[in-house]
Amino acid sequence: MDITEKSGLILEGGGMRGIFTIGVLDNFMDRGISFPYIIGVSAGACNALSYISGQRGRAKFSNIDMLEKYRYIGLRHLITKGNIMDFDLLFHKLPEEIYPYDYKALANSDVRFEVVTTSCITGKACYFEEKNDPKRVINLVKASSSLPFVCPITDVDGEPMLDGGVADSIPIERAMSQGFTDNLVVLTRNKGYRKPRKGTKVPFFMYRKYPNAKEAIRSRNSIYNSQIELVERMEEEGRLLVIRPEHPIEVDRMERDTNKLLALYEEGYNCAARIEFAKPKFELYDGKSAMIDKVKEFAQQGWELGDLHGISHWERVEKNGLLLATKEANKTVVRLFAYLHDKWRIDDGEDLQHGMRAAENLPALRGSLLSELSDEEFELLCKACELHTVCHRTGNITIDTCFDADRLDLTRVGILPRPSRMATERGAYYAANMQMYNKDFQKFSI
């Protein structure tokens, strides 16, 4: 699949079956795959949030680790709180205290993100966008996850809403209406699955104020089946790519067996891993590539130590850095680090001072080779060079990417990088999965 400006990612809900989607999205994050448009329904919307913010493992933590610890699904919650799920835990304590959500990353993201809900008044699907107001973000995904019968209605902008899956479980037509015609759909049911033809019965005492919502619930099965037929037809015609479980799954919407959930997560991850994407298109052409070429020439001038810490190592570090770099990392700094961090080595031994010597020598290049850098970029480069021999992690994504780009090349001296010693999430993933790293490294070209 070649991701273009017309590509969209469509995420079905399905309650705890959404752990399959989490596996898919974690694989995408590990490979640096992103989409310009994402639309999510119910659990799909919730899981999309961690994907957009780049918080790999967060959704898995909330669906497996937290479930095991807090048991946040069950009849006791329905009896005591009128909700089969502990929404206070999931939508307040989790994003605010237990595993804080990175709202800044969401706000700064270029991704267009839509959340689907169902209006109780009209019985129709509603599509919302919000990336700047944290309270509204949470309220939207909570509304999209408000299952009929077992969860309370959630107000959005003064309008009562239910789960988005009631009116639009697989919003492929919505994505296309927004101009996104090259789509990937993640489903949480196997191919061929259909809901029973018989509509859902709504007890007379429920949603009495909202007759259109009652009708939408009754009609949901037939609408869902027609959407699945559309997806399968477009898939057969080559107009759509679909990732779905390969076999009928044993995980229920309210599943509490963490072993089953973990198995479904792994299936999602592995299914996504088999999807071939075009080579990553990194934003290298920022007007500074000529400067980097000159720095590369400079680094080789007078170099006498050989290849262990020489040009082939530097080129691999550059490639590693671009493989690891997120949108937040400054790729120019990462590339320059690759060619300058070892420039002032005096031997191939430990030489722990070579990073400090690099930082001390860089100011001499400020008015010439490095004149195009901003003051902030120059400071980042100096710090990355200075600290890479003595510091584990700084918390700055650009500097930490430099560190991990260098560490991933330890294999050249027979040392396997340890995940616990990596500074970035992506670096830790590759350190734990060197086979995947080698595969991605070979596919990627600058």
Image (cartoon, grey):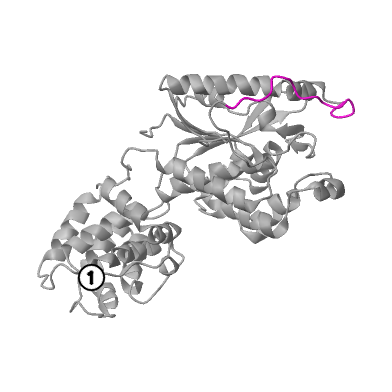
- Please say whether residue 25 is visible from this viewpoint: no
Residue on which the image places disc 1: 342
Q: Is residue 401 magenta?
A: no
Q: In the displayed structure, does residue 185 sit left or right of residue 132?
A: left
Residue 324 location, quadrant: bottom left
Report the span colored magenta: 193-208
Q: Residue at x 82, y 21 (%)?
A: 211
Q: Nearer the viewer, residue 108 or 437?
A: 437
Q: Position of residue 438 (x, y in %)?
A: 30, 54
Q: Position of residue 34 (x, y in %)?
A: 43, 42
Identify the amino acid type marked 1.
Asp
Residue 429 location, quadrant: bottom left
Q: Residue at x 86, y 50 (%)?
A: 80
- Looking at the image, the residue that sits furthest to the right is 205
- Please say whether residue 360 is visible from this viewpoint: yes
| Quarter containing the N terminus | top left
Q: Indicate whether 175 appears above or below 339.
A: above
Q: Residue at x 61, y 52 (%)?
A: 259
Q: Position of residue 120 (x, y in %)?
A: 77, 28
